[in-house]
Image (cartoon, rainbow, N blue to C red):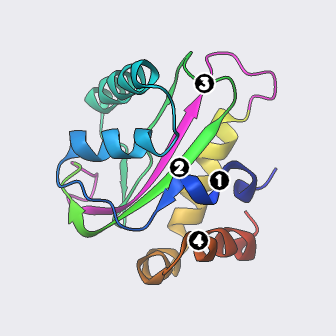
Amino acid sequence: MRLREFFSEDAITLELQSTSKDAVLKELVGLLKLDEKAQAMLFKMLKRRETLGSTGIGQHISIPHCRSLVVTRLRCAFGRSAKGIDFKAIDDQPVNDFFLIVAPPLEVSNQYLPVLGKIAQFAKESDVPARLAKLKTPAEFLALLEEKNI
């Protein structure tokens, strides 16, 4: 299993417009192209997850994640904010890079936690935050995932 398998170009944006935590969660959910009701439900689930503790893991990276019935398979999205957003991250730094993970409550392949772990591993590599900041296209993001081979 490789991270690259879970991302598609149409679920990647390098220019998030949001300036608040709630707005960025909504914008990330929008990348999954679900219907309005599903998007609203997913936003609520992600907000609830954030009340347990921020998914901002430091180094300007956050991994909002949850399980929800609105998806039938694990889905991922990536968004980048040049300005950075206050996400109450563990290092109190603004977050620029957001990796969204949504999985169904029960998944036969059980990929949710391994994918979460792989994204955290990818994000902790010393050169990754700087390289994410320089991306010009979604294809470059996918190529970086391929290159890191995580």
| Residue 122, quarter of picture | bottom right
Residue topped by disc 2: 77
Callout 1 amino acid? Phe
Residue 49 shows in the view: yes
Q: Pick the residue in front: 114 or 26.
A: 26
Mark 1 crowd level (few <14, some 14–19, many ≥20, 10 Å Cα): some
Q: Are marks 1 and 4 in contact (CB under 8 Å)?
A: yes
In the picture, the disc for residue 7 is 1
Callout 4 amino acid? Phe
Instruction: Relative to 22, say whether 133 is above or below.
Output: below
Which comes sooner in the sequence, label 3 or label 1?
A: 1
Residue topped by disc 4: 141
Mark 3 crowd level (few <14, some 14–19, many ≥20, 10 Å Cα): some
Residue at x-position 35% and y-position 23%: 40
Could you tell me what secondary structure mostly forms the magenta stretch? loop
Which comes sooner in the sequence, label 2 or label 1?
A: 1
The Cα atoms of the two marked residues, 1 and 4, are separated by 9 Å
Quarter occupied by the C terminus:
bottom right
Which comes sooner in the sequence, label 3 or label 2?
A: 3
Residue extent of the magenta highlight: 88-110
Callout 2 amino acid? Ala
In the rendered image, residue 150 lying in the magenta stretch gets the answer no
